[in-house]
Amino acid sequence: MRHRPRGTVEVVILALLCCSGLPLAADELEPVRIGVTREASAASLFIAIDAGYFKAEGLVPQVTFLKADPSVSAAVASGKADIGMAGLSAAFYSYAAGHSLKMIASRSSDQTRFPMYALLISKKAHAAGVSGVRGLPNARIGVASAEGGAYYGLFSIASRFKLDPDSIKTVSLKSSAGELAALSRGEIEAALLPFPTALQSAKGGYSLLLLSDFAQWQQGVVFTTANNIATRRNLIERFMRAYQRGTADYQLNFLSYDDGGDFIPGPYYARYLDLIARQARIPSGILARTKTYCDRRANLDVADIKKQVKFWQDQGRLDKGITATDLLDLSFIGEEPSAPH
């Protein structure tokens, strides 16, 4: 697919393949507008489009690639997109509560064997004892944001191992590049980074500590507006059926392992690896080593989402009147009965 020059919003109607049966005429297809950021955690969506699952539901997906998660939330809230996919954060929860957004399915989660974030630790800090979670107290840890899911994951680890949360010293550095620069200058002992970035930077004596080895959490979600659910439920249902076929294919091709722990590539692994790498603009070799996780049916970790909401409230970054239940509609993934319509 062709890309517009950088610096512009890229709106692309991705090519579809018909799975079976007679193809629908173009004027019989209903558009569904989807806002995403360009990253590998949207892999199941890319697969569902490529496999023709949306066309089978009478839909033509119009995918808009946006620069950041807040832009995705704003696009959905304003009606410029019907569906959004974004990472969870204090800002997301606050915006969702204020604009009647509802989480309806999983995009990605940080799971053992499928890490999304890691601590990149300097050689000096590692030698001084920052080699495991019990070495984290009083270590200076660079973070890109104090409102993101990785920050929550870091403090989930502290809670699990009964570490004093006040002993976890984070330094806000705005970006991964800022973290890496501070780490190279010795201003911090470790940098909290997306796993692909950490993996590519793990050289010259640096070591890795994978957060998902010690805590797992819901990282990204699929969402829409309460108004879309009330007035366009059929569209959302058809989107979800296509998307869940994509999540099932993603698991089959990327998340299967035998009893010995060896990866079992699915029948379309090579094809989909190339597809996702192109869409996410990640080298296929890196993508193969940094696969993200999504539940086979796109089920959400509701218990963890509730923990996240409470964590951000305890941090003073989220209004205490917000409840996780009010931000969820689980009917599309079969976790509660569908509302009458």
Image (cartoon, grey):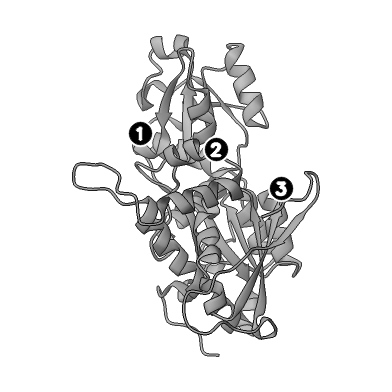
Q: Nearer the viewer, residue 6 or 302?
A: 6
In the picture of the structure, the residue carrying the numbered disc 2 is 283
Direction from residue 85 to residue 81 in the image, left or right: right
Closer to the eye: label 1 or 2:
2
Please tell me whether residue 235 is drawn above or below residue 301 in the rendered image: below
In the picture of the structure, the residue carrying the numbered disc 1 is 162
Q: Callout 2 environment at 10 Å: few (<14), some (14 to 19), or many (20+)?
A: few
Measured Cα–Cα span from mark 1 to mark 2: 39 Å
Residue depicted at 47% across the width and 36% down the height:
285
Q: Helix or strand or loop: what does disc 1 sit on?
A: loop
Measured Cα–Cα span from mark 3 to mark 2: 19 Å
In the picture of the structure, the residue carrying the numbered disc 3 is 67
Quadrant where the image shows the N terminus? bottom right
- The part of the image, by quadrant, that contains residue 17 is bottom right
Amino acid carrying mark 1 in the image: Lys
Measured Cα–Cα span from mark 1 to mark 3: 37 Å
- Image location (x, y in percent) of residue 37: 64, 51
The reply to whether dot 1 and dot 3 touch (C-beta < 8 Å) is: no
Residue 93, numbered label: none
Closer to the eye: label 3 or 2:
2
Outermost residue on the left side: it is 259
Please tell me whether residue 286 is drawn above or below residue 319 in the rendered image: above
Outermost residue on the front side: it is 22
Q: Callout 3 environment at 10 Å: few (<14), some (14 to 19), or many (20+)?
A: some
Residue depicted at 56% across the width and 17% down the height:
188
Residue depicted at 74% across the width and 70% down the height:
79
Q: Earlier in the sequence, mark 1 or mark 2?
A: 1
- Image location (x, y in percent) of residue 30: 66, 80
Q: Helix or strand or loop: what does disc 2 sit on?
A: loop
